[in-house]
Image (cartoon, grey):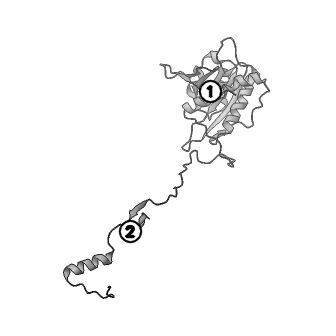
Amino acid sequence: MRFAPSQLVVSLSCDLNNPIKIRAKHKVAGMLLLDRDHANRLERGWNVPGAYILLDRPDAQGRWGAYVGKATNPGLRHRVLQQLKDRAHWYRALLIRYESNEDETLNSSEAGWLEGRLYDHLAKAGQVDLHNRNRPQDPTLSDDDETSLIDYLLPIESVLRLIGHTLHSRPAGAPDGGAPLVREIRPRPSVSKPPSRLSPVGSAPDASPPLGPPKDVKKIIAQIKAGTFVYQGPLSR
């Protein structure tokens, strides 16, 4: 599998009502980000086979819904306009088609394979709620065809990240993927020996009292200076 970094080229029209065109510079995937309110303005050149993702707005916790589909004939434009009537949940649609050669398009099998892989990709994310009732049944392709279509996946994920639909892996053991998207992991404090400090008899731990005369010695010195010191211990020879 060839997963290379995706360099995306984003084209914004001076007319804010026009869709945002996104192109992966060194890939074959052509993508279009379409706002629901402007779906009727979609160019007829997008009436070609391909795959699409209908996106819900992310909520406060970062969860978002999606529907993955494909279009064969008459094509993506016709299918999206149909979904405009059939599904009320989405606010944006990401359209994917073959774009390297204007004379070629994805065939029905390739569009179906891409639809199935996109479904699997989103299903693995912990914060995506898929509206598809069942997993799309994608056809079997040759190894060469699958290798060329795999190149679509990373640019699509990059586009989703660009528009605020980042994918996070589903936590292990969480059937609904409802775990927090980001979990702060604090390192455990390292256990180290206290630094040593010098003493008249060698090194001593930092917890030992600071160097200097003991308190009773200080008291005796003060009494001697005041002339009040009385020695009560045995006399030494």
> How many numbered tags mark residues here?
2
Circles 2, 1 touching at the beta carbon (< 8 Å): no
Q: Please tell me which residue is depicted at 30% across the width and 77% down the height of the picture.
A: 217
Q: Is residue 212 above or below residue 147?
A: below
Residue furthest out toward the front: 237
Residue furthest out toward the left: 226
Left or right? Give the position of 75 relative to 165. right
**Quarter of the image containing the C terminus?**
bottom left
Q: Is residue 118 visible?
A: yes
Q: Along the line of sight, which residue is nearer the eye, 161 or 80? A: 161
Q: Secondary structure at mark 1?
A: loop
Residue picked out by circle 1: 4
Residue furthest out toward the top: 103
Q: Residue 165's x, y, as percent?
A: 58, 35
Left or right? Give the position of 163 relative to 122. left
Q: Is residue 198 above or below residue 160?
A: below
Label 2 is placed on what type of residue?
A: Pro
**Quarter of the image containing the N terminus?**
top right
Q: Secondary structure at mark 2?
A: loop
Q: Is residue 19 visible?
A: no
Labels 2 and 1: the sequence-earlier one: 1
Q: Nearer the viewer, mark 2 or mark 1?
A: 2
Left or right? Give the position of 157 relative to 144. left
Q: Residue 181's x, y, as percent?
A: 58, 44
Residue picked out by circle 2: 209
Image mark for residue 147: none
Q: Residues within 10 Å of mark 2 (few under 14, many from 20)?
A: few
Label 1 is placed on what type of residue?
A: Ala
